[in-house]
Structure formats: structure tokens, C-alpha cells
Amino acid sequence: MNNSLVFVLLVVAIVMTANVLRTYINRRQRQPETNEELEETLAKIELLEERIEVLERIITENRFDLKKEIDDL
């Protein structure tokens, strides 16, 4: 093999390994979410679920009304 190709592959391998190690260390040092943050996130999820239910209801009702109007014609 060409010496320059081996050098390039070695540099790429070192950079990739360093990136994986940095990511691993960052994730390991990250603090777990507090109960307060978890409760806030759960409250947001519940709110979004309620909004989705309302939107689903609106879409379903509109389809029914549109179908009824078409049938009435």
C-alpha cells in the first residue's frame, strides 16, 4: 500500500475514535433530569395529547358533515 494512504486512514481512524470517546464522556457526565423537569415534561405531553384529541375530533366531525352535505345534494 501507498504510505500516504496508510497515513490518511490512520488519521481518519484517530479522529473517529476521538469523536466516539468525546461523545461517550459527554453522555456519561450529563446529569439526569430532575423530578421537576420530568413533571414539567409530562405536563406538556398531557397538554399536547389533549390538543391532538381536539384536533382529531374536529377533523372527524368535518368529514362527517362534508359527507352528509354531499349525500344531501
Image (tube, rainbow, N blue to C red):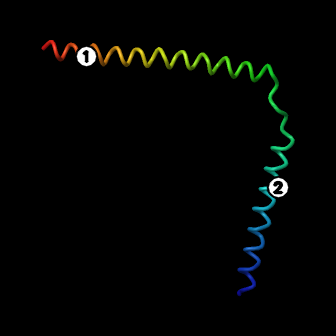
Q: Quadrant of the N terminus?
A: bottom right
Q: Would you say 60 lies left or right of 71 here?
A: right
Tell me what residue is drawn at x 54 percent, y 15 percent: 50
In three-dimensional space, the C-alpha distance between marks 1 and 2, rounded to whole angstroms, equals: 58 Å
Please say if 25 is above or below 14.
Answer: above
For the residue marked with disc 2, what is the amino acid? Leu
Q: Picture coordinates of residue 19 (x, y %)?
A: 78, 56
Q: Picture coordinates of residue 33 (x, y %)?
A: 80, 29
What residue is pinned by disc 2?
21
Q: Quadrant of the C terminus?
A: top left
- Pick the residue in front: 68 or 44: 68
For the residue marked with disc 1, what is the amino acid? Leu
Q: Picture coordinates of residue 43 (x, y %)?
A: 67, 17
Which callout, 1 or 2, points at the residue further toward the start of the chain?
2
Dot 2 crowding, Cα within 10 Å, few <14, some 14–19, many 20+: few
What residue is pinned by disc 1?
66
